[in-house]
Image (tube, rainbow, N blue to C red):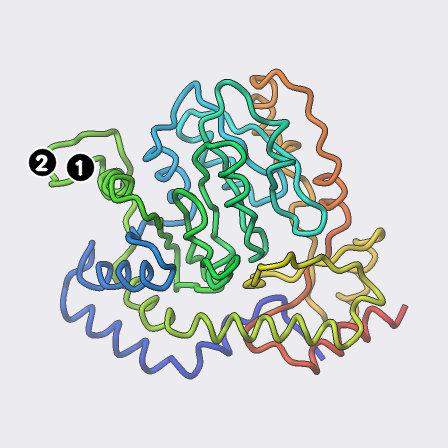
Amino acid sequence: MTVPLFDTKTPLEPLREAILERVAAAIDAGRFILGPEVAAFERELADYVGVGHAVGVGNGTDALSIAARALGIGPGDEVVVPSFTFYATAEAIAAIGATPVFCDIDPDTRNVTAETVAPALGPRTKAIVAVDLFGMPAEIPAIRDAFGLPVIEDAAQALGASLYGVKAGALGDIATFSFYPSKNLGGFGDGGAITTDDGELAERVRALRFHGSRDKQTFEYVGFNSRLDELQATILRVLLPHIDTWCDGRRAGVQAYIDAGLGEHLTLGATPEGATPAWHLYVATHAEADAKLAQLAAAGVQARGYYRLPLHRQPAMAPYLARSGRALELPVTDELARTNVALPISPVFTRAQADAVVAALASA
């Protein structure tokens, strides 16, 4: 059995006709930039997340840069970010002239905690980026309580997750999403959004995404040209009502792995009390991770290692490490980068597929 790492096609098949009809109607309407579909999707996303405001932007990376700028972050400021995450998390901070300062993560949740953030704080720290990595919500309320600094929640992988009943996207002062096609809510191209309960932050975000202007005449900021596309919003409006069902399917897939005996072959992470992950990816570990990946590939199972070169070891980040003037030891990050194995998961992942993955691991 061939088992794909992502299955983005099967869940969309029942929605194909509805998507085509809605896209055709949007084309006929002729409003392609910040039209009614974007406005409607922003309302629906805000309602789903449980916040007052959602603002559509061009992609998840722009969302991070704009969110940081809306908080007043710029040159001379430091922002604490995890090193074990996708490059864009730090890139977006560097792009606005601020300095990303890297911190370690918890070995079980793979997320930052108050304990891992503390060593990275300094007098120039203006905010913390907490990533809900692989769809596991980070313990953001504890981080906010511990330091009193703004927290940007990078929820790009976590739409549909929650912590003690609060949805991902509502845990931080401001949060960002990506609608890249492989995400839990994926569009048919690039797209992103920013969510917040702070009305003043939301207004700054709306201006920043449109060249720093609120009225197209007066420009208050040097901003961005980063707007969620009307056609993407049209598609995302069709998909959003299904996100909970799809995340339930992902959670059922993880349970299928556990029931099939995955823990006999790989070390599984922990889900903390109160957390309901969205499982954008299901990531286990093994001391000989690359050998396990080769074994899975030989059996037709698509799996991969993520972030093998963590951010604090990326060439482009070297100047920021030097600028911080701090010795950097991130042992958990380095170990997870070496040992992680990302396994297939999707909204339609089956027990038969889980059995095939486990059988491939057991075959050595």
330 vs 294, nearest the viewer = 330
Residue 308 horizontal side relative to residue 241, left or right = right
Q: Position of residue 50 (x, y in %)?
A: 36, 59
Between the residue at mark 1 and the residue at mark 2, the CA separation in whole angstroms equals 7 Å
In the rendered structure, find residue 133 and report the number of the disc placed on it.
none
**Quarter the N terminus occupies:** bottom right
Amino acid at the residue labelled 1: Ser
Residue receiving disc 2: 217
Q: As drawn, which residue projects farthest toward the front?
A: 145
- For the point 56% across and 48% down, which residue is it? 139
Label 1's element? Answer: loop
- For the point 71% across and 33% down, which residue is it? 330
**Quarter the C terminus occupies:** bottom right
Query: Counting other residues with Cα less than 10 Å from the Cα at mark 2, is it few (<14), some (14-19), or many (20 or more)?
Result: few
Q: Position of residue 12 (x, y in %)?
A: 44, 77
Amino acid at the residue labelled 2: Gln
Asked whether disc 1 touches disc 2, contact meaning CB atoms under 8 Å apart, the reply is yes
Label 2's element? Answer: loop
User: Is the residue 59 above or below the residue 321 in the image?
Assistant: below
User: Is the residue 295 above or below the residue 142 in the image?
Assistant: below
Residue receiving disc 1: 213
Q: As drawn, which residue projects farthest toward the left?
A: 217
Q: Position of residue 346 (x, y in %)?
A: 57, 71
